[in-house]
Structure formats: structure tokens, C-alpha cells
Image (cartoon, grey):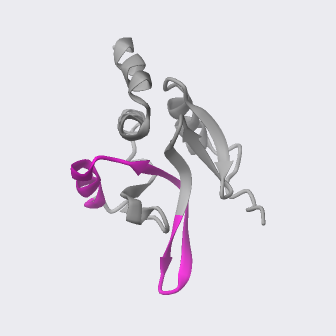
């Protein structure tokens, strides 16, 4: 069964995530489980997430799911806007609600760090060569 689309193409938060994620070497976008997923060989971030609270789904449509190194994920979990997403949380993914507290620089740094944890070494080297 195909998942319904769970995002708005005109969402400015999605546009910011898309611009940052697709600027990384070799990155592409696909729809996975109804949500945008940005990937090379593996997914480095998703737009939107959910978690189950007391048996009910709590949607986080304007959030980004990231795969960060353990120390960074632990620090981010201390933020009130962070959450452990359903299904992916057990695999070290963390969700971050995007709002006025999220600066474009912070978002770019987090997406890049997530990319670095899953992208092939040759693509990370291409990213490093840009600096």
C-alpha cells in the first residue's frame, strides 16, 4: 500500500531543508513513506516525522530527522524542540521541530553533520574540498 503524501510542496521550511540537503555532493530527493527523504547511497535526512504518545500518533510535519554522532544527538535531545521519532529513533535518528528558534546556519550545520555520518567517503571528501 502506498503512503499518502504527508507534506505541503509550498512549505517554506521544506524549501529551506531541500535547498541545504540537495546542495551536498551527490544528494538526491525521493519520497519515502509519504515524506521527503534526502539521500546519496543512504538517507541523510527526512522532512517531517512522528512519534507515538499514549497509543496515539503525534505528527511533527515541520521537522527534520537527522542521523547524528551520539554526542551531538545527546546534546540535541536536551532541546525542547527535539524528539525521538517513531521507528527511526532506535537507529540513532533524532527529530528537530523547525521554528523561529532554528537559524538557517544551525539547520545547515545539522544537515551537513547528518550527511557526514552516512555519505560515502568520496562524497564527504568532495564536500571538504569545497572549503
Quarter of the picture containing the N terminus is: bottom right
Q: Residue at x 44, y 24 (%)?
A: 123
Q: Residue at x 68, y 48 (%)?
A: 31
Tell whether 49 sits left or right of 124: right
- Residue 100 rendering spot, x and y as whole percentages: 43, 47
Q: Is residue 7 above or below residue 56?
A: above
The image quadrant that residue 74 belongs to is bottom left
Is any part of residue 98 visible from this angle? Answer: no
Residue at the extreme bottom of the image, as rendered: 54
Is any part of residue 93 visible from this angle? Answer: yes
Q: How many marks?
A: 0
Q: Residue at x 33, y 63 (%)?
A: 80
- Residue 39 rendering spot, x and y as whole percentages: 55, 38
Tell whether 99 sits left or right of 57: left
The image quadrant that residue 120 belongs to is top left
Tell whether 105 sits left or right of 45: left
Magenta stretch: residue 24 in it? Answer: no
Foreground pick, 67 / 48? 67
- Specify start and end residues of the magenta stretch as a single range: 50-78
Amino acid at each position: 500500500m502506498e503512503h499518502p503524501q504527508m507534506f505541503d510542496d509550498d512549505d517554506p521550511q521544506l524549501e529551506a531543508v531541500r535547498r541545504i540537503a540537495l546542495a551536498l555532493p551527490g544528494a538526491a530527493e525521493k519520497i519515502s513513506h509519504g515524506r521527503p527523504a534526502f539521500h546519496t547511497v543512504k538517507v541523510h535526512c527526512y522532512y517531517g516525522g512522528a512519534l507515538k504518545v499514549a497509543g496515539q500518533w503525534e505528527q511533527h510535519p515541520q521537522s527534520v530527522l537527522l542521523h547524528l554522532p551520539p554526542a551531538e544527538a545527546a546534546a540535541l535531545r536536551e532541546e525542547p524542540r527535539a524528539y525521538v521519532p517513531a521507528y527511526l529513533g532506535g537507529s540513532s535518528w533524532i527529530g528537530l521541530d523547525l521554528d523561529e528558534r532554528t537559524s538557517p546556519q544551525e539547520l545547515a550545520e545539522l544537515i551537513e553533520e547528518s550527511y557526514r555520518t552516512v555519505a560515502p567517503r568520496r562524497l564527504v571528501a568532495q564536500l571538504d574540498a569545497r572549503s
